[in-house]
Image (cartoon, rainbow, N blue to C red):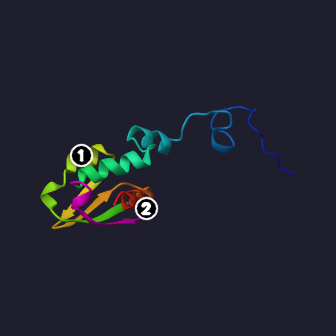
Amino acid sequence: MLSRARPPPGLPGRGTRGGTDERPTSREAAMAARGGGDLAGKAERIVAGLGGIDNIVEVEGCITRLRTEVEDPSLVDEAALRAAGAMGVVSMGTAVQVVVGPEADPLASEIEDLM
């Protein structure tokens, strides 16, 4: 019978999520660095980057993107959207897609609550 050697208890990186190691995962660290811990605040910053609540006609979460339609595309501030945590912005006329990662659906809900 084969026996597996078990690591000593308490070693970081062993077992479930680092054993006794309480460091955040790389995803948690990345979200914190981008200000992803405060979803409502991030939604407000994205709304501002899209030209304000009155400029947003429609918003929909789609896996990793916020698909939006805006009234006036000239009011969209790509730099502000990136500062709010967007990884990318794709604009085609009045359609604006904001790449935000896996929090797209909850962000869309937050934005809809503001509308």
Percent from the top left, x then y, of residue 69?
Answer: 24, 67
Q: Amino acid at mark 2?
A: Asp
Q: Which residue is mark 2?
A: 105
**Kind of element beneath mark 1:** helix
The residues tagged by marks 2 and 1 sit, at their Cα atoms, a distance apart of 20 Å
Q: Is residue 42 left or right of residue 12?
A: left
Identify which residue is drawn at 24% across, 50% down: 49
Image quadrant assignment for residue 63 = bottom left
Identify which residue is drawn at 32% across, 57% down: 99
* Observer able to see residue 86: no
Q: Magenta span has 42?
A: no
Q: Tell which of 53 and 88 is nearer to you.
A: 53
Q: Is residue 4 left or right of residue 68?
A: right
**Kind of element beneath mark 2:** helix
Query: Along the polypeptide, which appears first: circle 2 or circle 1?
Result: 1
Mark 2 burial class by Cα count in 10 Å: few <14, some 14-19, many 20+: some
Percent from the top left, x then y, of residue 97?
Answer: 28, 62
Percent from the top left, x then y, of residue 28?
Answer: 49, 42
Q: Tell which of 91 and 58 is nearer to you.
A: 58
Looking at the picture, does residue 103 appear above or below residue 94? above
* Number of marks present in the image shown: 2
Start-end of magenta stretch: 51-64
Percent from the top left, x then y, of residue 68?
Answer: 28, 65
Q: Which residue is mark 1?
A: 80
